[in-house]
Image (tube, rainbow, N blue to C red):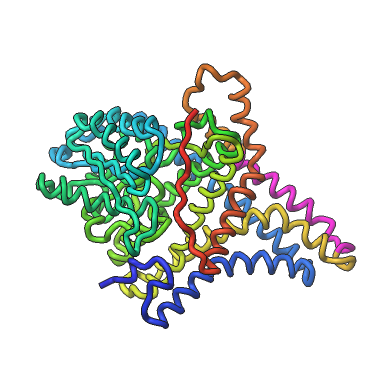
Amino acid sequence: MKNYISVSRAEDFENPKEKLLYRFLEIFPGFLSWGTLISAFLLSWLAPAVVAIFIIIFSLYWLLKISYFSFHQVSSFKRMRKNLKINWLEKLNRFNNWKEIHHLIILPMYREEKEIVESSCQALIDTKYPKDKMIVVLAVEERAGKQVEEMAREIQKKFSGEFLKFLVTVHPKSIPGETVGKGSNTAWAVKEVKEKIIEPLNLEKDDILVSTFDIDTKPYPQYFACLTFNYLTVENPRKCSYQPIPVYNNNIWSAPAFSRVVATSGTFWQMMQQERPELLVTYSSHSMPFRVLEEVNYPNNVVSDDSRIFWKSYLFYDGDYRVVPLHYPVSMDAVLAKGLKRTIINQYKQQRRWAWGCSDIPFLLFGFWKNKKIPFFQKVSHCLNILDGFWSWATGVFLIFFLGWLPLILGGEKFNVMLLSYNLPRMTRNIMTLAMIGMFVSAIISLLILPEKPKKLGKSKSLSMVLQWILLPFVLIVFGGIPALDAQTRLLLGKHLEFWITEKTRL
């Protein structure tokens, strides 16, 4: 039994040696990030010339990285636009068995407004896929109160006739061993729908695809047809998850500028990741075979359930599991609350929750230590990728914007009279200016993916969609590096993050 794939923290282990090792691995990400920043500060004082050379090399590395990502971003954007024009339902007609595929859509909710939940259900109806092959589960939390459950029943009554089945599940509160949040709610919903619908109807479990969506997720019209086509054509489809591109267009015209930059940056990151399928991990709204959920079990004891279900599956199947990029979008909400202050706080907490994905690092490293069947080079590749990702997230922005000045401030007179100290700020400034190509590429693509502007908004709003990218340095620091360091510091200190639900508001 691979019991280690169900752990969430060091305290879950009974074996003292395993507990100690896992605790060390929890400390490692924060230690690496803080060690980098503290070392940069100390060496700027003790060995400024060495740091200056490192800064130049790091800046060149960053320029190459931005160029590499920009190339993938443009390529992914072109593929997404091409896929949006394809009639996927028509392409399915070449398969005799495509109508045997059923789609189970799970929508975990808490206390969202009725309008938001209904709009997501309506988006499912508007998709171009047979509704008699779709099962919708509205997963309610008992702790949200009776009023929310009653609202869910009203929505069920309104939409149940549109689908094969429409089920409302109520996740009990205070189940021992669970972490409050989307993961535990989804795990309960999977169990309920299996007992109440799938087994009574005798549906073939290998022909069911499960889409775990956030409550604000609106799939584009041919999402399920595109998903089904990929499922029927990719190699070994039952050992794959399927990842769309999240586009935060539901309320993009209403969200403040900083929230738009954060949301759009998230979209672009996922676009780039779709071009590197060997390193792609499930994120937010995604789809996977029901059989995998039945065998692996959806994680109910972690905050970052979206990525953890992939890593659980990867370890369970001894590395024979991957994510298929769909290059097809689903639309979601940018962070928007009632008032600017609440929006800022919500945005920070959302980014910190996403950054809590660093808790996958000890889970994965420990899993690689336990699992001897996964090829060594696969392990090395995934380790380097996940470590680089979270290390760069927590340190990159500080190294870029501040490290270039530290040797000049702390290096003393001996360093400041060197030619290197004179050229350092100029060289880094020129390199970073070239790196701004990434920002221009992002600005252009952000305009191309915008939905139609509401008629009530003037031309100044369109202009703000361009000027918003001036905020990128601020956004990278306040809603990038700081929450990432916050999350890794909490993991380092053993203060595990609890799930925090992002408030959903539309104006």
Q: Quadrant of residue 156?
A: top left
Q: Report the magenta stretch's main SS.
A: helix
Q: Which residue is located at x 47 percent, y 50 percent?
A: 500
Rendered location of residue 241, percent (x, y) = 31, 51
Q: How many marks?
A: 0
Rendered location of residue 464, percent (x, y) = 62, 28
Q: Which residue is located at x 36 percent, y 68 percent?
A: 7
Q: Is residue 329 visible?
A: no
Rendered location of residue 491, percent (x, y) = 52, 65
Q: Residue furthest top?
A: 455
**Depth check, front residue: 102 or 487:** 487
Q: Would residue 407 be found to the left or right of residue 449 on screen? A: right
Q: Which residue is located at x 35 percent, y 46 percent?
A: 286
**Depth check, front residue: 170 or 493:** 170
* Quadrant, the N terminus: bottom left
Q: Is residue 235 visible?
A: yes
The question of residue 434 being in magenta is answered with yes
Q: Would residue 433 be found to the left or right of residue 360 on screen? A: right
The question of residue 426 being in magenta is answered with yes
Question: Taking 216 as reference, is 396 above or below it?
Answer: below
Q: Would residue 506 be found to the left or right of residue 485 on screen? A: left
> Which region of the structure is painted magenta?
416-439
Rendered location of residue 170, percent (x, y) = 28, 47
Question: Taking 312 as reference, is 4 above or below it?
Answer: below
Q: Which residue is located at x 27 percent, y 53 percent?
A: 188
**Depth check, front residue: 330 or 454:** 454
